[in-house]
Image (cartoon, grey):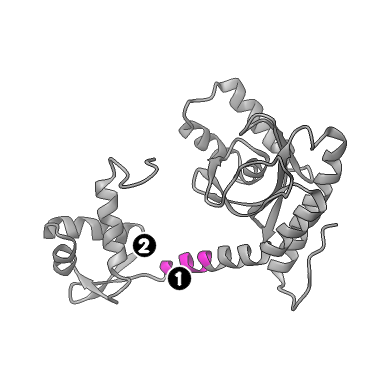
Amino acid sequence: MAASGKTPGVDSARRVLKVLLLFEDRPSLTAEEIASMIGISIPSAYRYVSLLREMALVEEAGGGRYVLTTRILTLAESVDTSTHLRLAAAGVLEELRQATGETALLIEQSGDYATCTAICESDMAIRISYAPGAIQPLHRGAGAKVLLATQGEQWIRRYLDRVEPSMPAKDRDRLIRALQEQLKAPYAVSRSELDDGVCAVAAPVTLGGRVIASLSVAGPEYRITPAMLEKFGHLVRRAADGLATRLNSPPSGEQVRVS
């Protein structure tokens, strides 16, 4: 993916998204109006609308007009959940940073990637370099693998089919077995999987019985020694469980303590 500017090779996809975004300002549109507003032919407009109808994002409202479906509400609810998650996580991340002295992160899944959506950086002189919005593959790093493990073996195998460079069969099988074992563990640990010399500990955050994110603590390996791993693991797990409790039944003014 290009770091800036237009992503190459996706012109058709870009036009479909432009069609969808037209409905931000208008409750209904005809194919002719769509064609005129985007600068495409009417047959192309019908083709893009057909794709959006296939994905249950747009439906015909009569008189040749099209409107958004209620599936958009589901997407909006997902955005609300994610926003609520980040707001609720802010204090928890700060508590986790104070308890461990290391950088605390909230990680969410976005398709085939894990994304850091909130961070509370360590105040140590030497610390990891990470920023909100940074993405990483789902099969590398404790926080990402916590998310991947919950997807089920079939989804994981299809994901690994898409990973580049491709992973040898024996490595895939080893990873899947490790992810299955990880589901039984209270927290996950990774060493030098994303960056050399960096250790991370992570635990899942659950809402309504579904893992929606992971909380992670990461720092230089020389500081997160084997002797510290168990302590950090329990702190991260307690923080994740506390955040889950807050999300599942939002309290009034209650603080989630991790220390």
From the top left corner, tell me how far across and down residue 163 is, in percent. 49, 32
For disc 1, the marked residue is 73
Three-letter code, disc 1: Leu
Q: Is residue 41 magenta?
A: no
Asked which secondary structure carries label 1, the reply is helix
| Structural crowding at the residue carrying mark 2, measured as other residues with C-alpha within 10 Å and reported as few (<14), some (14–19) or many (≥20) | some
Closer mark to the observer between disc 2 and disc 1: 1
Q: Is residue 57 left or right of residue 36?
A: right
- Evaluate whether residue 51 shows in this view: no
Q: Is residue 128 left or right of residue 154?
A: right
Q: Is residue 75 magenta?
A: yes
Q: Nearer the viewer, residue 221 or 39?
A: 221
Marks 2/1: CA–CA distance: 12 Å
In percent of the image, x 78 and y 48: which residue is there? Answer: 101
Image quadrant in which the C terminus is located:
bottom right
For disc 2, the marked residue is 56
Residue 213's image quarter? Answer: bottom right
From the top left corner, tell me how far across and down residue 38 is, in percent. 19, 61
Judged by its main secondary structure, the magenta piece is helix
Q: Is residue 237 above or below residue 246?
A: above
CB atoms of marks 2 and 1 within 8 Å: no
Image quadrant in which the N terminus is located:
top left
In percent of the image, x 29 and y 41: which residue is there? Answer: 8
Tell me where the magenta segment starts and ends, as one range: 71-79
| Structural crowding at the residue carrying mark 1, measured as other residues with C-alpha within 10 Å and reported as few (<14), some (14–19) or many (≥20) | few
In percent of the image, x 60 and y 38: which residue is there? Answer: 153
